[in-house]
């Protein structure tokens, strides 16, 4: 009896070992190992032919969910809803919020948002946080990371269970350009030190803005860009890309798809980590050469997204500007930059 048990135990151990070996073999053979240099080269468009990421999009809807019948022949005709590389462009009327929410609720996703309120920009934080609580991924797990040099002035905002604010103290700067551009470095560090493996998606947003309507699961994707409200009727030659060929943010005349906002972008944690890391290192390399791109990190982001096409594009509903009158194709404003007097709030002109 004793020796039979012993043999059985040894057999089970052997089988477990064999299964573990098989698992390692399968998972290793599906993994693409990419070094830092390779990763940067791919992101900068200097290396072709390597498969970088392998996203799984498996959308499971609850059974018996009732919703309006979708159509492929009726819908918005006043706007373009797909890019030439077949990424959806999200406009009001192109998605069903209840359907999307019910798909993502089953996945129990968590979303992070970053917002910087350095120096006098702290004055915008209360409205930002209060309106985020009303409109940003309502009903989902959300953590907002506030980066500020004035942690004691962060307003207390009542938030639902599973939602919260985490404050990170950061140094100030006497140049607004540095405050704005350093966001990429701090976003990269936040992801690598706190979020990787714990949070699913992240959005990086300007603080001098308010939410006015839903911003939710329709915005989720791998790499998510927002079309800048100031340029989407313009020819690409008018886009304020960095035009000096010496800069790592350079986009040549005749190139570029859209002009994207620096004030709102996001996506899955891994994609945003690579974007932030690449823009940060290109910004720093430019600085070492005595260069600062025309629109700081926004220029680097635009260069990045010219090469690394966003998998989802959010229409200017997702970052309007209060001083602009609403164009007819804008049926709803979800998030909008408030009117500010730069001379009063920036540390330098
Ligand atoms: C545009 C972009 C912004 C950034 C900038 C170029 C939009 C709507 N905005 O806005 O994201 O790309 O061009 O650098 O696309 N900040 C502080 N304290 C300061 C200065 C800035 O906290 O003293 C933070 C704050 O979160 C602010 C953000 O940096 O929202 C961008 O600065 P901005 O709003 O002054 O830049 P702006 O309006 O030129």
Image: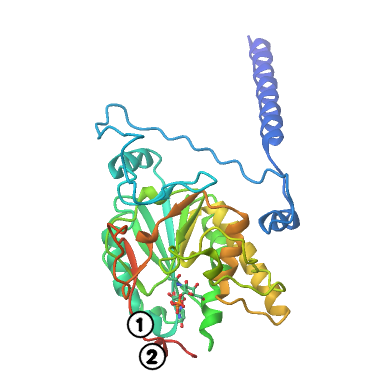
Q: Is mark 2 within 8 Å of ligand 1?
A: no
User: How many dots with numbers?
Assistant: 2
Give x and y (percent) for residue 155: 31, 75
Q: Which mark is residue 340?
A: 1
**Would you say 175 lies left or right of 50 here?**
left
Residue under the point 43% across and 63% down: 233
Q: Is mark 1 within 8 Å of ligand 1?
A: yes
Could you tell me how far apart the alpha carbons at marks 1 and 2 are, in whole angstroms? 8 Å
Location of residue 321 (image quadrant): bottom left
Q: Which one is nearer the viewer's eye here, 179 or 12?
A: 179
The image position of residue 320, as x and y in percent, is 35, 67
Instruction: Give me the disc on residue 105.
Output: none
Pinpoint residue 258: horizontal percent, then vertical percent: 51, 60
| Disc 2, SS | helix
Q: Quadrant of residue 164?
A: bottom left
Q: Secondary structure at mark 1?
A: loop
Crowdedness near tag 1: few (<14), some (14–19) or many (≥20) residues, C-alpha within 10 Å: few
Question: At 51% across and 83% down in the image, what residue appears?
Answer: 176
Query: Along the horizontal axis of the image, is 64 left or right of 58?
Result: left
Q: Which of the two residues, 165 or 301, is positioned nearer the viewer here? A: 301
Dot 2 crowding, Cα within 10 Å, few <14, some 14–19, many 20+: few
User: Taking 286 as reference, is 214 left or right?
Assistant: left
Relative vertical location of residue 298 with respect to residue 344 in this rendering, above or below: above
Q: Identify the disc placed on residue 344.
A: 2
Label 1 close to label 2 by CB (< 8 Å): yes
Colouring: rainbow
Q: Quadrant of the N terminus?
A: top right
């Amino acid at each position: 009896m004793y020796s039979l048990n012993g043999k059985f135990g040894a057999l089970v151990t052997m089988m477990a070992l064999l299964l573990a070996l098989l698992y390692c073999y399968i998972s290793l053979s599906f993994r693409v190992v990419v070094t830092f240099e390779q990763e940067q080269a791919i992101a900068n468009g200097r290396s072709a032919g390597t498969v970088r990421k392998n996203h799984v999009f498996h959308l499971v809807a609850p059974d018996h969910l009732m919703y309006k019948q979708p159509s492929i022949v009726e819908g918005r005709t006043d706007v373009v809803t797909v890019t030439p590389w077949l990424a959806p462009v999200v406009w009001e009327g192109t998605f069903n919020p209840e359907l999307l929410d019910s798909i993502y609720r089953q996945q129990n996703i968590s979303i992070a948002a970053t917002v910087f309120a350095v120096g006098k920009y702290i004055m915008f934080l209360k409205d930002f946080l209060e309106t985020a609580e009303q409109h940003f991924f309502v009903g989902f797990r959300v953590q907002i990371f506030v980066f500020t040099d004035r942690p004691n002035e962060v307003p207390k905002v009542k938030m639902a269970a599973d939602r919260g604010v985490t404050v990170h103290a950061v140094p100030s700067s006497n140049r607004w350009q540095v405050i704005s551009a350093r966001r990429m470095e701090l976003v990269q560090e936040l992801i690598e030190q706190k979020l990787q493996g714990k949070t699913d998606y992240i959005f990086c947003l300007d603080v001098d803005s308010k939410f006015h309507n839903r911003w939710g699961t329709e915005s989720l994707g791998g790499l998510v860009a927002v079309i800048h409200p100031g340029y989407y009727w313009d020819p690409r030659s008018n886009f304020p890309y960095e035009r000096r060929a010496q800069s790592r943010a350079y986009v040549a005349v005749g190139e570029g798809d859209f002009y994207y906002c620096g004030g709102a972008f996001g996506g899955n944690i891994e994609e945003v980590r690579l974007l932030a890391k690449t823009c940060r290192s290109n910004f720093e390399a430019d600085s070492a050469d005595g260069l600062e791109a025309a629109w700081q990190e926004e220029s680097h982001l635009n260069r990045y997204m010219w090469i690394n096409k966003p998998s989802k594009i959010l229409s200017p509903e997702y970052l309007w500007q209060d001083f602009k009158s609403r164009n007819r194709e804008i049926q709803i404003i979800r998030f909008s930059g408030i009117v500010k007097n730069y001379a009063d709030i920036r540390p330098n002109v």
